[in-house]
């Protein structure tokens, strides 16, 4: 009996930094038409989410920057957890070391680090690098897992400053104050939803992934691609008589 559906965006609802497909929008609209809530939880900014999922943004709860900037579908602003200057400086120091250690070919060095106010995102080869290059650069997350392991001590220092580092998107390591799990929990409590009726669907539920923090907060369902996510939504709608009521 699931009524509240949380979706990751990149790798789940869409390909990296790409527009959502019409059929995926139709699936989300079917969920909404069945009286369900749809929540999009992404490392992206709200502006980027609008760019990728378009008009349907108005009908969903938006949890941008891993939920550190959350707004309801009616536009009501719920919270914004901004990184402090000291936290950002520490993140920039670690990211510089990670860039050196990764030693990858980068075409546009200005495209590697994005300060999104509530989140800093480090992309291995560039946030706006060609999609195919991005998808090929670290498909099994080995490079990013290796970086997090190599800089375990620095990441622990960041944790002491209240900042978390997680693998996100297709090429990113995201730095935020709260992770997705904290923010999902906060939203469920704020809305007064029964957590048994919530499900989170994402492609990075593995340890170190930016969806992993949701494990144990609400039930989770892993998908490996938007295609698999769409099949899952179709299944959910098909069995709505038993699943939704
Ligand atoms: Mg993802």
Image (tube, grey):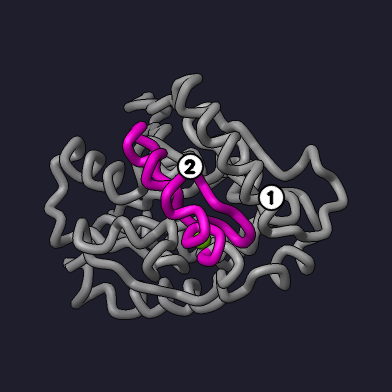
Determine if residue 151 is in view: yes
Determine if residue 21 is in view: no
Going by the image, does 241 lie left or right of 16? left
Q: Is mark 1 within 8 Å of ligand 1?
A: no
Residue at left 51%, top 43%? Answer: 57
Q: Which percent across, then down, holds residue 130?
A: 81, 59
| Residue on which disc 1 sits | 99
Q: Which percent across, then down, holds residue 2?
A: 22, 64
Q: Is residue 238 above or below residue 97?
A: below
Distance between mark 1 and mark 2 Cα atoms: 15 Å
The kind of secondary structure element at disc 1 is helix
Return the mark for residue 89.
Answer: none
On the image, which quarter does residue 144 sit in? Answer: bottom right
| Residue on which disc 2 sits | 175
Q: Which percent across, then down, holds residue 60?
A: 42, 44
On the image, which quarter does residue 211 sit in? Answer: bottom left
Q: Residue furthest right?
A: 107
The kind of secondary structure element at disc 2 is strand
Specify the quadrant that holds the N terminus. bottom left
Q: Which percent across, then down, holds residue 68?
A: 40, 35
Q: Which of labels 1 and 2 is toward the front? A: 1
Going by the image, does 86 lie left or right of 23? left
Closer-to-camera residue (145/79): 145
Q: Which residues are magenta?
A: 145-174
Closer-to-camera residue (165/119): 165
């Amino acid at each position: 009996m699931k009524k509240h559906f949380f979706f990751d965006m990149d790798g789940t609802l869409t390909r990296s930094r790409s527009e959502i497909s019409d059929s995926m929008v139709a699936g989300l609209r079917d969920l909404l038409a069945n009286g369900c809530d749809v929540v999009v939880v992404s490392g992206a900014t709200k502006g980027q989410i609008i760019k990728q999922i378009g008009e349907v943004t108005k009908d969903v709860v938006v949890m941008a920057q891993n939920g550190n900037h959350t707004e309801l579908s009616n536009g009501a602003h719920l919270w914004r957890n901004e990184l402090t200057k000291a936290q950002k400086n520490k993140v920039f120091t670690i990211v510089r070391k990670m860039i050196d250690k990764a030693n990858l070919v980068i075409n546009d060095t200005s495209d590697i680090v994005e300060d999104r106010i509530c989140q800093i995102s480090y992309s291995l080869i560039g946030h706006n690098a060609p999609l195919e290059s991005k998808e090929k650069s670290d498909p099994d997350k080995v490079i990013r897992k290796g970086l997090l392991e190599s800089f375990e001590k620095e990441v622990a220092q960041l944790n002491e400053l209240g900042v978390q580092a997680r693998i996100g998107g297709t090429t990113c390591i995201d730095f935020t104050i709260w992770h997705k799990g904290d923010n999902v929990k906060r939203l469920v409590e704020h809305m007064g939803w029964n957590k048994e009726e919530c499900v989170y669907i994402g492609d990075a539920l593995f340890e170190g992934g930016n969806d992993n923090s949701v494990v144990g907060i609400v039930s989770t369902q892993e998908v490996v691609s938007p295609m698999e996510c769409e099949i899952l939504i179709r299944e959910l709608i098909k069995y709505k008589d038993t699943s939704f009521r």
